[in-house]
Image (cartoon, helix red, strand yellow):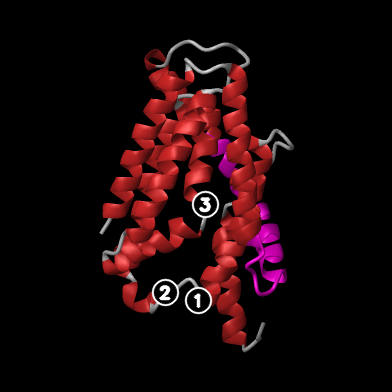
Amino acid sequence: MITGTLLNVATVIIGGLLGVLIGNRLPEKMRQTVLHGLGLMTLIIGVSMAVSTQNVLIPLFSILIGGILGEALRIEDALERLGRWSEQRLGRLVAPRDADQPSLAQGFITASLVFCVGPMTILGSIQDGLMGDYTLLAVKSLMDGFAAMALAASLGAGVILSAGTIFGYQGALSLLAALFGAALGGVTRESLWVVEMTATGGVVILGIAFILLDIKRIRVANLLPAVFIAPLIVLLLARLGVGF
């Protein structure tokens, strides 16, 4: 039921550990180049996801409503507090770092967002829970393992802690899918709610790319509710008989 999630957790931990070990031996310019390269790829992925929408108004309203909800719930502040708490608890296990190096909290938040926002996370977790098919999550695991290595080389050990976020988030989705499988019905990449959730997730991923590329510091975590607002809008429009 959560086989794919466990595999994903393992690859992120292994990749993160390798990144931390190798990162200390890599020149700063090389680490920055790797991080910026990952940022460029994240930008491309975000754009490719965002343009899949069939009605741009759905991601637009999803981002607006989700952003308001996220700010009201102060999601990013909560993640930062969790990261700082982890840093205090695990600080003795982490080698001292310079003041200009990323904090444990920054690595945790960035990696959690990179690994948990996207269509493969949602659809893969649902497929794993509904049918025991973890093919998508297996592919995602390989990608995340390499990404964790690159991120940890630049952002440090906080990336490894994101394995906990993956386990909680993807595991919960799979368990919910198993419990409410009959209500969900057939789920494919062409399902309208999946398409619009994917497009909205792409917009959020663009925010992550801007952070990785040092373009703009966006409170991306506060936009996460938008990913779940999008399918609700699709279902509401379908109930009202509004075509798009």
Q: Position of residue 106 (x, y in %)?
A: 56, 30
In depth, the one of 120 and 117 nearer the eye is 120
Q: Which sits earlier in the primary sequence, circle 3 or circle 1?
A: 3
Number of other residues with Cα within 10 Å of mark 3, as a class: few under 14, some 14 to 19, many 20 or more: many
Q: Are marks 3 and 2 in contact (CB under 8 Å)?
A: no
Q: Gap between marks 3 and 2, in whole Å?
A: 18 Å
Q: Position of residue 150 (x, y in %)?
A: 50, 32
Three-letter residue code for mark 3: Val
In this rendering, is residue 211 above or below 102? below
Queried whether the magenta region covers residue 53, the answer comes back as: yes
Under tag 2, what secondary structure? loop
Three-letter residue code for mark 2: Val
Under tag 1, what secondary structure? loop
Residue shown at 37%/64% (left/top)?
126
Three-letter residue code for mark 1: Ser
Number of other residues with Cα within 10 Å of mark 2, as a class: few under 14, some 14 to 19, many 20 or more: some
Q: Gap between marks 3 and 1, in whole Å?
A: 18 Å
Q: Which residue is mark 1?
A: 191
In depth, the one of 97 and 48 nearer the eye is 48
Q: Is residue 93 left or right of residue 224?
A: left
Q: Gap between marks 2 and 1, in whole Å?
A: 6 Å
Q: Which residue is mark 2?
A: 187
Q: Which sits earlier in the primary sequence, circle 3 or circle 2?
A: 3
**Main secondary structure type of the part rendered in magenta:** helix
**Magenta extent:** 50-79
Q: Which residue is mark 3?
A: 117
In depth, the one of 24 and 217 nearer the eye is 24
Q: Position of residue 43 (x, y in %)?
A: 65, 48
In this rendering, is residue 201 above or below 222? below
Can residue 219 be seen?
Answer: no
Residue shown at 48%/49% (left/top)?
116
